[in-house]
Image (cartoon, helix red, strand yellow):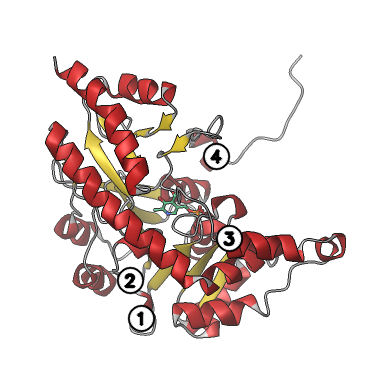
Amino acid sequence: MDLPRPKPRPAIERMAAYHPPSSGRAGKLRLDFNENTVGASPRVVSKLQQVLSADALTVYPEYTEVLPALARFFEVAEDELILTNGTDEAIQVLINAYVDNDDDVLILTPSYAMYRFYSEVAGARVRTLPYKPDTLKFPLEELLAAIRPTTKAILISNPNNPTGTALKREGIERILDKAPEAAVLIDEAYFEFCGITMLPYLNEYPNLFVSRTFSKVYGMAALRVGCLFSCAENMAALHKSHSPYSVNYLAAIAARAAIEDTAYLKSFVTEVLAAREVLTAGLEKLGVPYVPSQANFVLMHIGPRAQEVCDRLKLEGILVRNRGYEIPGAVRVTVGTQEQTRRFLIALAPLWQEIQR
Ligand SMILES: Cc1ncc(COP(=O)(O)O)c(C=O)c1O
């Protein structure tokens, strides 16, 4: 017998379920999620061990020390940032503050799945624009033409996941100028590998929002911590739509320890940039087509047997991400160390040669 039950909102009923692969990754060479492949700074781990006590866990988190430290590190004013439960919560807070049922939201495809996810949860009408065919470059003119006076939010990953392509500051400024009444999010999850940032311009553009994460280069994806930035005038609205204790105490402590170890961060970025060269040189030698990347991952065109290649790499303990559901034949590989990259290339070579025959 069917019992009466609460009916989800129409916006939720319309949504497709999103199931990222999220198990069986331990112990493998994880080149599938663009994480740091060597781990968080040892200083983060020892700080967490030092502060972990039963007493510390009883108290609701306080952010009075971490916020000023983060503001100094990111060179913004203290009232220009909020600490969020990963970028995901930054996107959610922004959408909750600015987007209503039936509102117009612009996103690009392929891009980070959570832009569509939170927009759809809010009941927005999501319009999508494709990255340029073949080159997968940012479709700037097309986006500018698609902006309407009623557009409420434009959500951009820069550099973009999974294409690795980035838009220059001048292009972002044209979008900000064209959409003064839309909340424009520039998600800088991969900033460290690319160097383009809009953080210095928060006060020039009242419609500019920037997010950063501790999940990628900092190696702290498990802790769920990120930041959302905008000019001080926008903060009241963001705070109203933000749960006050969403970032746990350990995550906040870890974020602070991570920004204190800039040497660790720099050495990992230097290693990844060198490994990206090794990877692209290796792909060229093999004849694997790929999209030049400004991030810590590269999108390769493997072709119709992409899933088989992913499965066989997995048997060898190497995880990569099949993005064929968005770009047929495309597989994304995270760039780790040079040694990890060589291991990946050695495993890929015979598979690639086999599927070419
Ligand atoms: C563009 C982009 N933004 C954000 C994230 C992750 O965000 P979070 O900080 O919630 O881990 C990812 C992860 O894949 C991403 O690709």
Q: How crowded is mark 3: few (under 14 residues within 10 Å), some or many (20 or more)?
A: few
Kindly tell me whether mark 4's CB lies below 8 Å from ligand 1.
no
Mark 1 touching mark 2, by CB under 8 A?
A: yes
Residue ID for mark 4: 12
Give the residue pinned by disc 2.
197
Where residue 27 appears, as percent x and y from the top left, is 54, 34
Q: How crowded is mark 4: few (under 14 residues within 10 Å), some or many (20 or more)?
A: some
Relative horizontal placement of residue 273, taking residue 314 as reference (left or right): left
Type of amino acid at the residue the image marks with label 2: Thr
Earlier along the polypeptide chain: callout 4 or callout 1? 4
Q: Residue at x 27, y 61 (%)?
A: 148
Q: Is residue 101 above or below residue 279?
A: below
* Residue type highlighted by circle 1: Pro
Q: Looking at the image, is mark 1 or mark 3 earlier in the sequence?
A: 3
* Mark 4 → mark 2, Cα distance in angstroms: 34 Å
Identity, as a three-letter code, of the amino acid under mark 4: Ile
Query: Taking the image as drawn, is residue 254 in sight?
Result: yes
Q: Is residue 303 left or right of residue 332?
A: left
Q: Earlier in the sequence, mark 3 or mark 4?
A: 4
Q: Tell me which label, 4 or 2, sits earlier in the chain.
A: 4
